[in-house]
Amino acid sequence: MARNRAGWPGRRAFLRWSLAVPAVVVGARRQALAQPRTLSPTPSCVDKGTPTPSQTAGPFFKPQSPQRNSLLEPGMGGPRIVLTGSVMSTACRPIPGALLDFWQADNRGGYDNTGFRLRGHQFADEQGRYRLETVVPGLYTGRTRHFHVRVQAPNQPILTTQLYFPDEPGNRSDFIFRPELVMTVRDGAGAKAGAFNFVLAA
Ligand code: FE
């Protein structure tokens, strides 16, 4: 999984530079560097032993989505979000190569049921991490804001579930919503940063 580090100073250059400026400036600079475009949540074992709950796939899943880490396409409307996290076992061990297949509504609340717009699958890296670039899904009648995802450890059963946004008014009235499936979402430069760790029973 390639990460864009463009624009980051080399370590030697950074050290040399940081020795030459006041500590307060270094602190500010470090804070800036510590706010990358994505969150990298430390895998949490708070809920060790508790698998991520499953949810209905709904009517819009399509198999054979393209493999890609970005669902963004030219002209696509709506705020951007970069979603990151890990796929772990109930023993909090990362699951390298886990399959993650995402599908979602566009910013107007519509699904592409003829093509594969806003659909894509990827495989977690050697540390069980994933990264998805996409847009914030829009609302449609009867549902709060959500992503759909299927997650599967190699040769294990598929977990089908959904991810939700914090502080979303519709969460209170959506009977499918579960608070355990709320992502951490922060505003970032150019894109929101979302985070969620999946825990598989496998
Ligand atoms: Fe949906």
Image (spheres, rainbow, N blue to C red):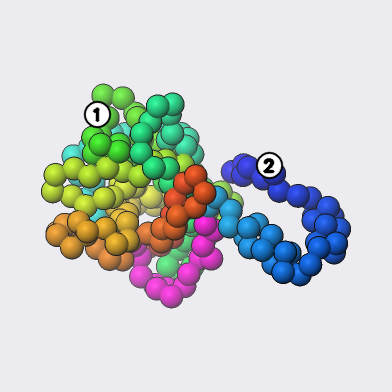
Quarter of the image for residue 200 reads bottom left
Task: Judge depth for marks 1 and 2 and give the one in front.
Answer: 2
Which stretch did the figure color magenta? 39-53
Q: Main secondary structure of the magenta part?
A: loop
Q: Could you say where residue 171 lies in the image, as x and y percent from the top left?
A: 22, 59
Secondary structure of the residue carrying numbered label 2: loop
Instruction: Identify residue type, mark 2.
Output: Ala
Q: Could you say where residue 67 lies in the image, as x and y percent from the top left?
A: 46, 34
Q: Compared with residue 151, is residue 93 higher up or lower down, i.e. above or below?
A: below
Residue identified by numbered label 1: 113
Mark 1–mark 2 Cα distance, whole angstroms, equals 36 Å
Task: Tell me the quadrant of the picture where the C terminus can be found.
Answer: bottom left
Q: Compared with residue 153, is residue 53 higher up or lower down, i.e. above or below?
A: below
Cβ atoms under marks 1 and 2 closer than 8 Å = no
Q: Could you say where residue 8 lies in the image, as x and y percent from the top left?
A: 71, 48
Q: Compared with residue 144, is residue 91 higher up or lower down, i.e. above or below?
A: below
